[in-house]
Image (cartoon, rainbow, N blue to C red):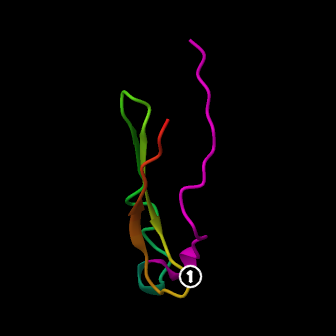
Amino acid sequence: MVLTWTEIRVSDFASNFDDAFFGTGRFIGDYNGLAIDFRGFSFPVWTGVRPGKADSDIFFAIVGP
């Protein structure tokens, strides 16, 4: 079996983590994770800060095989 890895951008914005957690820049990785099911779908979860916001949110995506 040959395993491969491909990088895929799942967010449509870059985060400024200086603005995370009400402008303190803390707790930016508390909710990051990745699950992959038996079909090859991946379910990334990450913390991000949308441009113009002063607090972080949690985001997720579904990425097909």
Count of picture labels: 1
In terms of image quadrants, where is residue 57?
Answer: bottom left
> Which residue corresponds to the image point at 43% horizontal and 54% vertical from the top-left?
61
On screen, 60 above or below 49?
above
In terms of image quadrants, where is residue 42?
Answer: top left
Position of 45 compared to 5: left or right?
left
| Stretch in magenta | 1-20
**Which element type, helix, strand or loop, lies under badge 1?**
loop
The answer to if 59 sits in the magenta stretch is no
Q: Residue furthest top?
A: 1
Task: Tell me the amino acid under the disc marked 1.
Answer: Pro
Q: Quadrant of the N terminus?
A: top right
The percent position of residue 30, horizontal first and vertical second, equals 39, 60
Residue nearest the observer in this picture, 64 or 19 = 64
> Which residue corresponds to the image point at 62% horizontal and 27% vertical from the top-left?
4
On screen, 59 above or below 56?
above
